[in-house]
Amino acid sequence: MAHLWSGRFDGSPDAALFEFGASFRFDRRLFEDDVMGSLAWAEAIAAAGVLSSDEAARIRAALEEILAAGKDSSFFSSA
């Protein structure tokens, strides 16, 4: 299978690029915890007065949407 960059560049990408992307399967296992941590952080900085209640609500809604999307396995295959 041709890579997206085939035909556009003369050389191959650096091997480090592929090593970096190889962690994606592991990162997927951390997805829910990562989003939950972001939700908790948004709540904490809202409680500290850094975010307005409207900003916190918008961030919470966006993170909950991301969390719901992540429950569908096709979400990760499109990344």
Image: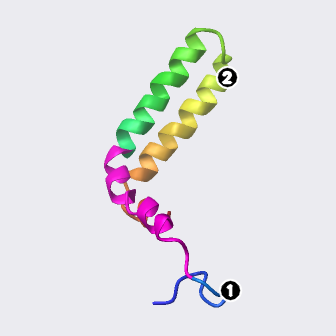
Q: Is residue 64 left or right of residue 45?
A: left
Tell me residue 20's x, y (percent). 45, 59
The residue sitting at the top extreme is 48
Does residue 3 lie above or below 33 as drawn? below
Instruction: Report if residue 78 is visible in the image.
Output: no
Tell me residue 31's x, y (percent). 39, 45
Which residue is painted at 52% across and 38% down in the image? 63
Does residue 3 lie above or below 63 as drawn? below
Mark 2 to mark 1 CA distance (whole Å): 45 Å
Does residue 37 lie above or below 28 as drawn? above
**Circle 2 residue:** 54
Which residue is painted at 54% across and 24% down in the image? 42
Bounds of the magenta segment: 12-30
Tell me residue 46's x, y (percent). 59, 15
Q: Residues within 10 Å of mark 1 (few under 14, many from 20)?
A: few
The disc, 2 or 1, on the residue closer to the chain's N-terminal end is 1
* Number of numbered tags placed on the structure image: 2
Q: Is residue 36 left or right of residue 52?
A: left
Give me the disc on residue 26: none
Give, as a three-letter code, the residue at label 1: Arg
Q: Is residue 77 left or right of residue 12?
A: left
**Circle 1 residue:** 8
Give, as a three-letter code, the residue at label 2: Asp
